[in-house]
Amino acid sequence: MSVTVELDAQYRQLREECGVLPRERGVIAVTGPDGAEYLQGQVTNDVEALAVGEGQYAALLDRKGHMQTDMRVLRVAAEEIQVDMEAAPKDQALRHLTMYSIGRDVAVADATAERALLSLIGPRAAEIAATPPLPEFANESTAIGGTAALAVGTRDGIDLFCTAADRDKLLAALLEAGAVEVTPEAVEIVRVEAGIPRFGAEMDAGTMPAEAAIVEDAVSFTKGCYIGQETVARLHYKGKPNKHLRGLKLSAAAAPGATLRLGEKEVGTLGGSVVSPALGPIGLAIVRREAEPGTELAVGEDGVTAEVVALPFG
């Protein structure tokens, strides 16, 4: 597999101009006077510290400290918090957050069908959205081409949430302003190059935050208790994870899901795998501790090998 001319053009658009991608994300609305206090006891980060217009990265864990999902938490109003995540774990997160909300002045609702998301990625994102550059997770109401949207700062640009009914209208306005629609494959190259893990690719329901290298961004060690806290704290202060998120420099393209072996021992599974125009074939994986940077792994059964490297990619 090689980078096609079309995919290379999309990649350049993301790196040099601005691409737009409609995304499928699960969205949960948490409303009511007890919303922030309630989420404080459920997720890993300090929700109560958020002012209106601020946000953060967090995770929802089970009692053993394994992830149910990672998520973005946005305080969009005094009594409204929007939580979004990959689409697949949304139903489990909704069940969890609904079950534990009983007896509190809080409402938990699935807003996925009502809210659409368009991601602007690239150095011209703020210009295209006609908004000031936003710090990551900062959020504010805006209007683009007459369409109301919630603008959210990201690592690489701006995410825009609008009503599902307005999605096509907003997309048309962004294209008119100079954005170019890109594919998930092009955006995946940018993600893997940045070494950012994704739930459903590198992370799953068996992953601990420390294994995915998200503790610094997603976990507060100064807030009160939350589900799974004891395991997270014990591993942080007294232990070492048995697995680590690593980059892989591949000898050739390989399919996500391929088994990774060190000698005869299975040490992980290939997550995101792309052919980068800048770096060549690369991938991400959570691998066992013995697969240290500099180690060579066998990838799948087709003779592909991978050099384990520390992130970010050099």
Image (cartoon, rainbow, N blue to C red):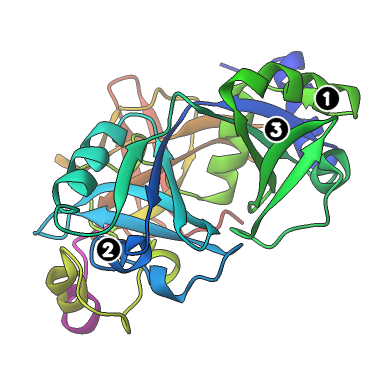
Q: Closer to the observer: label 2 or label 3?
A: 2
Q: Which residue is located at x 40 percent, y 68 percent?
A: 47
- Residue 89, position in %: x, y? 29, 35
What mark, if any, has residue 173 been given in the picture? 1
Residue topped by disc 3? 277
Task: Answer left or right for 6 relative to 279.
Answer: right
Q: Quadrant of residue 248?
A: top left
Q: Quadrant of residue 29?
A: top left
Among numbered discs 2 and 1, the one appearing first in the sequence:
2
Q: Point out the stretch of residues depicted in magenta.
A: 235-243
| Disc nearest the viewer among 3 and 1 | 1
At 35% across and 49% down in the image, what residue appears? 70
Q: Is residue 271 left or right of residue 52?
A: left
For marks 2 and 3, give the CA distance. 45 Å
Q: Report if residue 301 lies within the magenta region.
A: no
- Identify the residue shown where x is 64% and y is 53%: 155
Quarter of the figure that contains the C terminus: bottom right
* Residue placed under numbered mark 2 in the picture: 38
**Looking at the image, residue 151 lies above or below residue 243:** above
Please report whichever mark, 2 or 3, sits nearer to the chain's N-terminal start: 2
User: Which kind of residue does numbered mark 3 sit on?
Assistant: Pro
* Kind of residue sitting beneath label 1: Ala
Query: Residue 56 at x, y = what percent?
Result: 49, 62
| Figure disc tally | 3
Q: Gap between marks 3 and 1, in whole Å? A: 29 Å
Give the residue drawn at x 70%, y 20%. Answer: 7
Q: Amino acid at mark 2?
A: Tyr
Q: Compared to 73, does 240 lie above or below?
A: below
Marks 3 and 1, the one that precedes in the sequence: 1
Classify 10 Å Cα crowding around label 2: few (below 14), some (14-19), many (20 and above).
many
